[in-house]
Amino acid sequence: MALFRNSIAVALTGFLVLAVAVAVPLLPAFGEGGARRDVVLHERECKGSTMDMLYLVEFEPTQAGTSTSREQTIELLDKRIIPTLESLGTDDKVRAGGIAGDTLAGTFVVVGAKSKDEVTELVRALPAWSIMQWKVTPLETFAHRADIEKKVVQGLRTQK
């Protein structure tokens, strides 16, 4: 039952982080926001310029991340977990993220990475990388996906 709750919590945290990562830049206080931002990003894509991607990174502790004694718990928290959380909280490439409730499972969004390999390097540099299970998912921009769907609609209309 706890595993089910943790899975739900991780999924909801991921959704929340994604929503925040997308909504915050839409605010006028963040410069070119909203539809204008998507147009600018889309123009960069169309011109073939290298555009940094967004990546959703999810993590949860593995069996190696559990401790059996008080001393092991202190060392695990002090040497791996706390430095990892502090690093994620100050890294410029991490746009938003958080931990799900009373667990050590969490999610964050990476921006400014040119490839999944770059995100993997970021994750492997974290002190807790070896005691967590990591999942990295590339995300498309809304404008890019809208263009794909417009092409599908065009193709369906011409098939009459």
Image (cartoon, grey):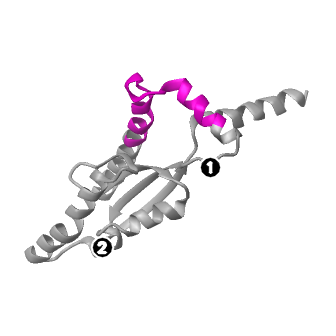
Classify mark 1: helix, strand or loop: loop
Label of residue 63 in the image: 2
**Quarter that holds the N terminus:** bottom left
Q: Can residue 155 be seen here?
A: yes
Amino acid on which the number 1 mark rests in the picture = Thr
Residue identified by numbered label 1: 50
Which residue is rendered at x = 19% and y = 71% of the image?
Answer: 79
Residue located at (42% from left, 31% from top): 23
Residue situated furthest right in the rendering: 160
Considering the image in quadrants, where does the C terminus appear?
top right
Within 10 Å of disc 2 (Cα), the crowding (few <14, some 14-19, many 20+) is few
The residue segment tinted magenta is: 17-43
Task: Residue 49 in the image: state x and y as whole percent.
Answer: 65, 46
Where's residue 44, x and y in %?
64, 39
Q: Nearer the viewer, residue 140 or 135?
A: 140
Q: Kindly identify the amino acid type of the residue bearing the numbered disc 2.
A: Gln
User: Is 17 situated left or right of 86 in this image?
Assistant: right
Give yes or no for contact between labels 2 and 1 (Cβ–Cβ under 8 Å). Answer: no
